[in-house]
Amino acid sequence: MDHLLRKRQGVDTAQLRADAAAYGVILEPHHLEPVSYGLWAEHLPAVELLARCITQWRAGSNGVIGLDYGVVLEMARLYRTPDLPRVMEDLQLMELHARELINKQSTR
């Protein structure tokens, strides 16, 4: 992700290509292009809350378990997240999908 942010700022991706090549990975041009997604306004509070808590994963010996809800709820209170029950439902859906992807990547 960092290389995408740097690319937007005009930094060359040569170092990323060199790093990838060192591991035998060949990056195609489409791998280096930023991807844009649309976001419905009603989902913005959940996405913002997840972004604020993205480093607050609990993990065990079998991988990521889920977000630390103590921290999630404290951040929601701190940032005055509106309609918290609905936002938590949306956040839990994103958490389940993210947990699945994270744990799948760690088994490779």
Image (cartoon, grey):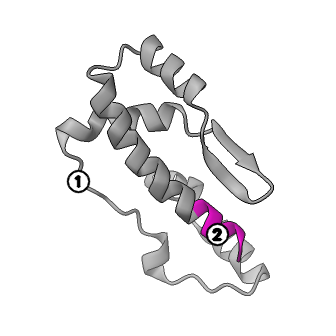
Relative height, residue 8 to residue 34 (above, below):
above
- The front one of 12 and 51 is 51
Main SS class of the magenta portion in the image: helix
Disc 2 on helix, strand or loop?
A: helix
Marks 1 and 2: CB-CB under 8 Å? no
Which is nearer the N-term, disc 1 or disc 2? 1
Residue at the outermost left position = 41
Residue 38 tag number: 1
Range shown magenta: 102-108
Would residue 62 be visible to someone looking at this image? yes
Give the residue displayed 61% in from the left and 33% down from the top.
68
Is residue 90 covered in magenta?
no
Disc 1 on helix, strand or loop?
A: loop
Residue 94 tag number: none
* Amino acid on which disc 2 is placed: Gln
Q: At which x and y percent is residue 10?
A: 48, 55
Give the residue displayed 34% in from the left and 39% down from the top.
89
Q: At which x and y percent is residue 55?
A: 63, 38
Residue 82 lies in what quarter of the image? top left
Give the residue displayed 46% in from the left and 58% down from the top.
97
Relative height, residue 60 to residue 68 (above, below):
below
- The front one of 98 and 23 is 98
Q: Locate the N terminus by quadrant.
A: bottom right
Q: Which residue is mark 2?
A: 105
Tell me if mark 1 has few (under 14), some (14-19) or many (20+) residues whose alpha carbon lies within 10 angstroms of its own. Answer: few
* Amino acid on which disc 1 is placed: Gly
Left or right of 67 on screen, residue 107: right
